[in-house]
Amino acid sequence: MNAPDTTLASLYSSVRDIPDFPKPGIVFKDITPLLADPALFRSALDVMVAQWKAERIAKIVGIESRGFLLAAPLADRLGAGLVIVRKPGKLPYKTVSEEYALEYGTDTLHLHADALSHGERTLVVDDVLATGGTASAVGRLAGRMGANVVGFAFLIELGFLKGAQKLNGAAMHAVLRY
């Protein structure tokens, strides 16, 4: 489902550009005005839910930290469990991890070792798809745990960074595309 043009225009206009954040040359897409407006937040979630409701999702995997803001209400609306992916040292139980490349170095993401089951239909959720490194790592991690990664859901896709190419052809949907 796509949002009506007026809703889509309102969603786009609620995303604020912050130049040179977090470093010079980057234009950060600030979603906090969208989140602060209950009607717009609800509309964005409605679009995301409509895209995935027929997929019988069992678990939503939310990526730290802004992905949690979307993953939790999506899990509730889709009748799915919520699983969170965190940086090292943030989860209290035994974890499995996936290291991935950054522009300068590497990072690691962790998931509780019992969070996903073999064959479980899983949707990976984050706020923004940029270069695709983080989402791709989460997809690999969920796959290693035996989950069936049905797709990836984002509020925003920065298409010029070609992050979707790192998702290995998996289904992907973003509400807003830049």
Image (tube, grey):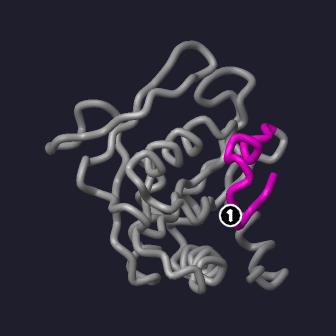
Closer to us: 24 or 125: 125
* Picture quadrant of residue 134: top right
* Picture quadrant of residue 51: bottom right
As displayed, is residue 24 above or below residue 138? Answer: above
Residue at 81% across / 52% down in the picture? 178
**With 1 as the anchor, is 61 left or right in this view?**
left
- Residue 13 locus on image (x, y percent): 75, 64
Stretch in magenta: 161-178
* Picture quadrant of residue 176: bottom right
- Amino acid type at circle 1 is Ser
Q: Is residue 80 magenta?
A: no
Q: How many marks?
A: 1
- Residue 158 locus on image (x, y percent): 75, 46
- Residue 26 locus on image (x, y percent): 71, 29
Residue at 47% across / 54% down in the picture? 67
As displayed, is residue 138 above or below residue 71? Answer: above
Mark 1 Cα-neighbour bin, 10 Å: few <14, some 14–19, many ≥20: some
Name the residue that disc number 1 marks: 14
- Residue 117 locus on image (x, y percent): 33, 62
Closer to us: 97 or 8: 97
**With 51 as the anchor, is 124 left or right in this view?**
left
Name the secondary structure under disc 1.
helix
Closer to us: 8 or 127: 127
Q: Farthest top residue? A: 104
**With 80 as the anchor, is 149 left or right in this view?**
right
Q: Is residue 167 magenta?
A: yes
As displayed, is residue 25 above or below residue 175? Answer: above
Quadrant placement of the N terminus: bottom right
Residue at 41% across / 68% down in the picture? 120
